[in-house]
Amino acid sequence: MTVLSTKSNFADPDAAYRLIVEAHRGLGEGQSADLDAALVLILANHIGDLDVLREAIALAQRRMAAASQQQQQQQ
């Protein structure tokens, strides 16, 4: 079993971020969501480990909940 890595594994994390941002340039909201969904499925398949995928989903959900809670506190 592989453990979810949350540290940056990119030699140039800024370049990776720019690549993702550029992939969305010129897309509408729906197209951007479709691109994200396709990218998630492709990368999940590449990982190929359900335990890691579960851990990643749980982490993403916790981060979204924390961000939502922070937004509510700021209002």
Image (cartoon, helix red, strand yellow):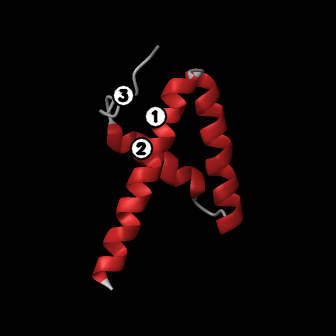
Q: Residue at x 29, y 78 (%)?
A: 73
Q: Residue at x 56, y 21 (%)?
A: 49
How many other residues sit within 10 Å of disc 1, few (<14), some (14-19) or many (≥20)? few
Query: Where residue 29 appears, x then y in whole percent?
Result: 65, 67
Q: Amino acid at mark 1?
A: Glu
User: Quick check: marks 3 and 1 in contact, CB under 8 Å?
Assistant: no
User: Quick check: marks 2 and 3 in contact, CB under 8 Å?
Assistant: no
SS state under label 2: helix
SS state under label 1: helix
Numbered badge on residue 59: 2
Q: Is residue 26 above or below residue 63?
A: below
Q: Residue at x 41, y 60 (%)?
A: 65
Q: Residue at x 60, y 23 (%)?
A: 46
How many other residues sit within 10 Å of disc 2, few (<14), some (14-19) or many (≥20)? some
Q: Is residue 25 above or below residue 5?
A: below
| Camera-side residue of 25 and 9 | 9
Q: Amino acid at mark 2?
A: Leu
The quarter holding residue 6 reads top left
Alpha carbon distance from label 3 to label 1: 10 Å
| Camera-side residue of 45 and 58 | 58
User: Quick check: marks 1 and 2 in contact, CB under 8 Å?
Assistant: yes
* Residue 20 in sight: yes
Quarter of the figure that contains the C terminus:
bottom left
Q: Which residue is mark 1?
A: 55
In the image, 68: left or right of 8? Answer: right
Numbered badge on residue 42: none
- N-term mark: 2 or 3: 3
Q: Amino acid at mark 3?
A: Ser
Q: Is residue 10 above or below residue 34?
A: above
SS state under label 3: loop
